[in-house]
Image (cartoon, rainbow, N blue to C red):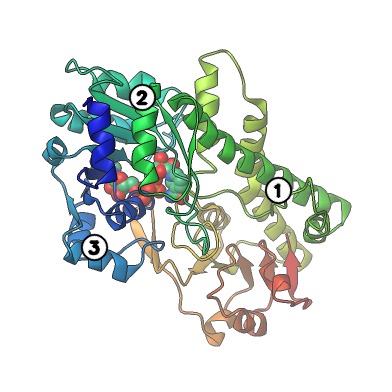
Amino acid sequence: MTIKEQLIEMFSNRQAKVAVIGLGYVGLPLAVEAAKAGYQVIGIEVDSNKVNLVNQGKNYIGDVKDEELNQLVSNGKLRATLDYSEIQNVEVVAITVPTPLNKTGDPDMQFIVSALDKMEPFVHQGMLVTLESTTYPGTTNELMVPQLTRNGLKIGVDIFASFSPERVDPGNPIYHTQNTPKVVGGSTSDCCEVAISFYQTVIQNVVRVSSATAAEMVKLYENTFRAINIGLVNELAIICDVLGTDVWEIVNAAATKPFGFMPFYPGPGLGGHCIPIDPSYLAWKLRFHNYRAKFIELATEINGHMPEYVIQRIIRIFNNLQRSVKGSKILLMGMAYKADIDDVRESPALDVMILLKKLGATVDYYDPHVPSIREENHSIQSIALTSDKLNEYDLVVITTDHKKVDYQLVIDHSKLIFDTRNALQKLGYKGNNVIKL
Ligand SMILES: NC(=O)c1ccc[n+]([C@@H]2O[C@H](COP(=O)([O-])OP(=O)(O)OC[C@H]3O[C@@H](n4cnc5c(N)ncnc54)[C@H](O)[C@@H]3O)[C@@H](O)[C@H]2O)c1
């Protein structure tokens, strides 16, 4: 039996052991799904707090069910560790570490590089290493494979490498890790076959593409598509303001077209660990080929400018009242970058808060999913939402449209509301103390 055949057999009878490196929004749900599929799973983390929580069966990711994690941990199917040497005993390694941008807006590959460096001494014959972190096209073949084969192992024969982008949409009530189709591309055709055989045992629907680079491109295309369309609708919001039309009415009416149109909605900017970042990975790679990704640059500029645009609108609101932002008291409703989740990474609400403070406003926030945030070196707590508290603010800005919020209370006790998410009209409220983006 070849090594490839042995691995495929170990997947079909679940004899293979699986390690997931990085137990965050992507890694923990994947680890849970692999354990539910019948594998023995080890999560490898650098954050000892997460290791302890997992080993106590305590969940910290919204999309993971508390009881499910608890049960898998108590049955010994899932555990976490800080120790990379465990890799010598596993047949599958899935890498799900962060891929942010650095201060100059270029890919920050330090987490992937560090994961590969730490696992290198324990890489062995008869394993599949699959990268899931979103990254620039070429990472699997140019960065990962050379390191996996440094000890003389032959790719596609002794060891197998693939890229399979994670598409998780945190907070989505229908689609989660297990039932979202998974694109898989291998470094070689045999690598792809091994990777597909593994993923088919964990994920409902697996989609094969011709190479790891193709799989990397698929993810970047999907997220670039979103970033560009959000950029377009954000610019439409500015255009509608100039022309005195209601952007929400235009988008909602356009969305009644049953073919050839997909609605995107404006807001105070882009947030999260994906849409504001991933297109820059593609644009960065293209710069090596003397090609400028023009759509990406334009969308990045428009989306990045939205917090400033929101500030301009707030200044206009105060100007119309013959008042200034300086000395005013403003409440931001929502700190998470999108509805019904607790993730504040790259959240535009943070930018709006900082910009308002620079103008001399006193700014508080309320977010039922985000009890506190860190700004520079200090912690800021979400306020408790009460009628008395709401009465204190000159302006309430709806920056996230969480379902959990008591909007009736907000409507009844706020003097003025600037709704950047159309949250109130969605509830059917059209009162005259509301100004919409
Ligand atoms: N969050 C999403 O919605 C989403 C969706 C699709 C794809 N992605 C991509 O998935 C990847 C992971 O994103 P995430 O949101 O899960 O990030 P995250 O920050 O929630 O989780 C990453 C985890 O990796 C750990 N880590 C960092 N370096 C490590 C190392 N060397 N060894 C072991 N653990 C390490 C961190 O402590 C953290 O717990 C990124 O590339 C991201 O772009 C994220």
Could you tell which of marks 1 and 3 lies nearer the N-terminus? 3
Q: Residues within 10 Å of mark 3 (few under 14, many from 20)?
A: some
Q: Which is in the foreground here, disc 1 or disc 2?
A: 2
As drawn, the residue found furthest toward the top would be 290
Callout 2 crowding tier (Cα within 10 Å): few <14, some 14–19, many ≥20 = some
Q: Residues within 10 Å of mark 1 (few under 14, many from 20)?
A: many
* Above or below 377: residue 62: below
Mark 1 and mark 3: span between their CA atoms? Answer: 44 Å
Residue picked out by circle 3: 72
132 relative to 407 in the view: left or right:
left
Q: CA distance from mark 1 to mark 2?
A: 44 Å
Q: Residue furthest front?
A: 1
Residue at 66% in and 80% down:
411
Q: In the image, which disc is placed on residue 190?
A: 2
Q: Which mark is residue 369?
A: none
Mark 1 secondary-structure assignment: helix
Residue 300 sits in which quadrant?
top right
Quick check: 19 above or below 159? below
- Ligand 1 location (quadrant): top left
* In-image side of 199 versus 281 (left or right): left
Q: Residue at x 51, y 66 (%)?
A: 340
Q: Which mark is residue 234?
A: 1
- In this rendering, does residue 158 appear at all? yes
Who is closer to the viewer here, 219 or 135?
219
Pick the quarter of the image with the N terminus: top left
Q: Secondary structure at mark 2?
A: helix
Mark 1 CB in 8 Å range of ligand 1? no
Which mark sits nearer the N-terminus, 1 or 2? 2
